[in-house]
Amino acid sequence: MILSDFHVHTRYCDGKNSPEEIIIEAISRGMKKLGFSGHSYTSFDEEPCMSVTGTERYKEEINALKEKYASQIKIFCGTEQDYYSDFPAEGFDYIIGSVHYVLIDGEYICVEHTDEIFTRLIHVCHDDVYEAAEKYFATVADVVRKTNADIIGHFDVITRLNRGSKFFDENNPRYVAAWTSAIDELLKTGKPFEINMGGVARGYKDFPYPSRPMLKYIAEHGGSVILSSDAHVKENLMYKFAEYEELALSMGLKVVEL
Ligand SMILES: [Zn+2]
Ligand SMILES: [Zn+2]
């Protein structure tokens, strides 16, 4: 049974709790390993990420807490490195590589924020949502090279706002071709894909990222997965991990930890 979680946000970015509050919760749940993954700095969208100076304070605080709680839990100081972050990720124990934006004609457009922004994305893609998906997955295909990631973050976060197929059909052949070629590229890296609970925990999604067909494809091609809560509140640590660990194993996926 997995008793670790490596995708956790604190007040240094858009999370609600301090690192120490989260550590105390993790210890009380019997967790063995806990990784913090503050959002890397993106100057074009400063609201959800750590500031430049905040990133340095974050490293200092997590590294101090690592020592303080060393006898009770193994703590990792990581980052969720956005594809378009201003700086390379340096001085961290591990990196989650994530794509939150596509870059079109100099404009960074978030794929998972609001319906209005998603509608804008479709518009700048010639009113073709599948063109938007193709651009998104072409970016994701390159995320390990660009971010030097150890973990592939929420592979299909572009579905976050798509409940009830509101914007696109996930069975559309162009959509399937786009994600298939991205998985093919990423499998070559040998890095695990997250099973990311963030959308489920926050009520956007009925199934984690990536979708069941994607997980099936990853399983059939020998890929591995890592369970991630993407918790922004301490209560969501290891959210539904037991259920999805069982599902992943039943699908033939290799479930790994750091
Ligand atoms: Zn993310
Ligand atoms: Zn995250």
Image (cartoon, rainbow, N blue to C red):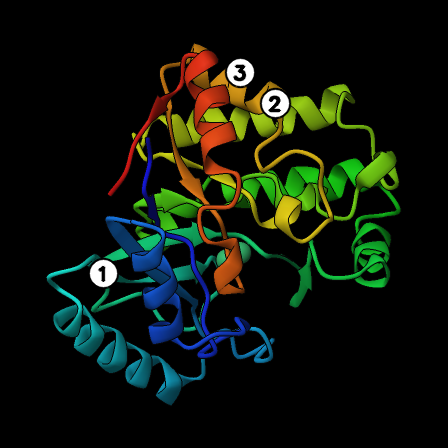
Task: Give the class, few, some or many, for how many residues have Cα within 10 Å of label 3's Cα (few <14, many ≥20).
Answer: some
What percent of the width, then of the height, locates residue 175? 71, 28
List the residue tagged with mark 1. 75
Alpha carbon separation for disc pair 3 and 2: 6 Å
Tag 3 and tag 2, C-beta contact below 8 Å: yes
> SS for tag 1?
strand
List the residue tagged with mark 3. 216
Precedes in sequence: disc 2 or disc 1: 1
Specify whether 72 is left or right of 51: left
Residue closer to the observer: 196 or 242:
242
Residue 16 has which mark? none
Residue closer to the observer: 34 or 162:
34
| Residue at the image position 49 percent from the left and 75 percent from the top | 13
| Residue at the image position 75 percent from the left and 39 percent from the top | 131
What percent of the width, then of the height, locates residue 244? 50, 29
Rendering quarter of residue 28: bottom left
Task: Give the class, few, some or many, for how many residues have Cα within 10 Å of label 1's Cα (few <14, many ≥20).
Answer: many
> SS for tag 2?
helix
Precedes in sequence: disc 3 or disc 1: 1
Q: Amino acid at mark 3?
A: Lys
List the residue tagged with mark 2. 212
| Residue at the image position 61 percent from the left and 19 percent from the top | 213
What percent of the width, then of the height, locates residue 69? 17, 68
Q: Quadrant of the N terminus?
A: top left
- Residue 257 versus residue 236 in the image, above or below: above
Q: Amino acid at mark 1?
A: Ile
